[in-house]
Every structure is written in C-alpha cells, then in structure tokens.
Image (spheres, rainbow, N blue to C red):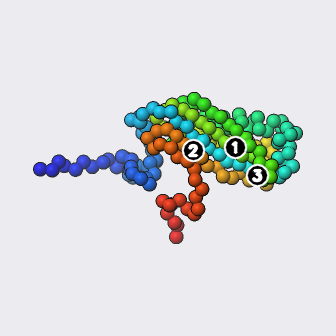
Amino acid sequence: MKPPKTRKSAASPVKGPGTLTHFDRRGQAHMVDVGAKDETHRVAIAGGRIEMQPATLGMVLDGDASKGDVLGVARIAAIQGAKRASDLIPLAHPIQITRISIEFQPETEASAIAVRATVECRGRTGVEMEALAAVSAGLLTIYDMCKAVDRGMVIQEVRLLEKRGGKSGTFMHRTRKGPHPKARRRT
C-alpha cells in the first residue's frame, strides 16, 4: 500500500529553480524562513556609478563643493544605507553586519565616480541587499550634494558584482546581453 500523498499548505513557499521565494503558493508576500540555514561567513560586493559634468567632477575631487566633502558624506551615507536595508526593503531580514567597506573610484575620462560596497556578516542569509542599498545611498548622496550645480547627473549600473557564502555558493556578475533567460516577455 502506498503512503498517502501529503499536500503542502497553501501558505508553504514554492521552491525550485526560477522560483520567486518571497511569495507563497497563493501569491502572498512573506519573509523567507531562514531558521534552518547554517550560519556561514557571507560576503556581497555591489557597484554602481554616477556620471556628471566635468566641472562637477572637478569640484567633488578638489573638495570645492559648497557643501563640503562630498565623498566623505557619501561614504557615511553608504554605510548607513547598508545598516538600514531591512528598514527600506520590506521583506529583507535585519542582519548583524560585521564589516562594511566603501570605495570611490573617479573616472575622469567618463566624468563619473564609481562606487563599490563590500558587506560581510556571519549569518543565515546573505548581505546582497545591504551592499546594493549601500551603493544606492552613496550615489544618491553624491547626487543630492551636487544637484545645485548639475541636475543632469545620471546614476547607472547599480548591480551585484559578487556574492560568497551560504548554500548557493559563489555568484560573479557577468555581462548579460538581452533579458534574463527566465524573464517573461510581456505581450
């Protein structure tokens, strides 16, 4: 005799490749249960950039902006962004971050500043959202502090560059051509 089939409750998350884990079987949003996961050392690196007029870049790099040290303030904002990710992103877990590093790289030929955030923890879930929030907050702060002289700045290429730790292993960003292979086209 075969054992009876057990039916998952409607609230059970749907799991499998290509599945959005923040929705249950009824399509309702929920916070993913990470309680059974092992605590591991986790690292996420995110990046992004902001393009601006050459004169604006010169002001930022020379420290001549009327609001003071733009990159110093942006660094603090990026750190705060990482620490507040779970306050900004509704289903992100609060994470005990162990390290945050923010780097700015001027790109004089492109008249841009690249931002790179490295966030680490020892926990049950990754710190990708914290790294992305850090980059976003840093870039937005540069925009805010320079908008009086350059409202045409463009924030771009905010993305996860690398992720390590946990069951899913290592992720390294690669350049994609076209839409994500699992993305559905709208007609």
Q: Is residue 127 above or below residue 175?
A: above
Judged from this view, the residue extending furthest toward the left is 1
Q: Nearer the viewer, residue 75 or 101?
A: 101
Q: Is residue 112 above or below residue 186?
A: above
The residue tagged 2 is 162
Mark 3 crowdedness (10 Å alpha carbons): few <14, some 14-19, many ≥20? some
Q: Secondary structure at mark 3?
A: strand
31 on left or right of 161: left
Picture coordinates of residue 79, whole percent (x, y): 66, 34
Mark 1 crowdedness (10 Å alpha carbons): few <14, some 14-19, many ≥20? many
Residue 181 in sight in this render: yes
Q: Nearer the viewer, mark 2 or mark 1?
A: 2
| Residue 118 figure quarter | top right
**Of pointers 2 and 3, the one earlier in the residue sequence:** 3
159 on left or right of 144: left
Hey, what amino acid is under mark 3?
Glu
Check if mark 2's residue and mark 1's residue have beta carbons within 8 Å: no
**Which residue is depicted at the point 71% across and 36% down?**
75
The residue tagged 1 is 115
**Which residue is depicted at the point 53% across and 59% down?**
180
Picture coordinates of residue 7, whole percent (x, y): 27, 49
Q: CA distance from mark 2 to mark 1?
A: 14 Å
Mark 2 crowdedness (10 Å alpha carbons): few <14, some 14-19, many ≥20? some
Hey, what amino acid is under mark 2?
Glu
Tell me, for residue 51, which label it has, or none. 3
Hey, what amino acid is under mark 1?
Val
**Of pointers 2 and 1, the one earlier in the residue sequence:** 1
55 on left or right of 157: right
Q: Secondary structure at mark 1?
A: strand
**Which residue is depicted at the point 46% across and 38% down?**
166
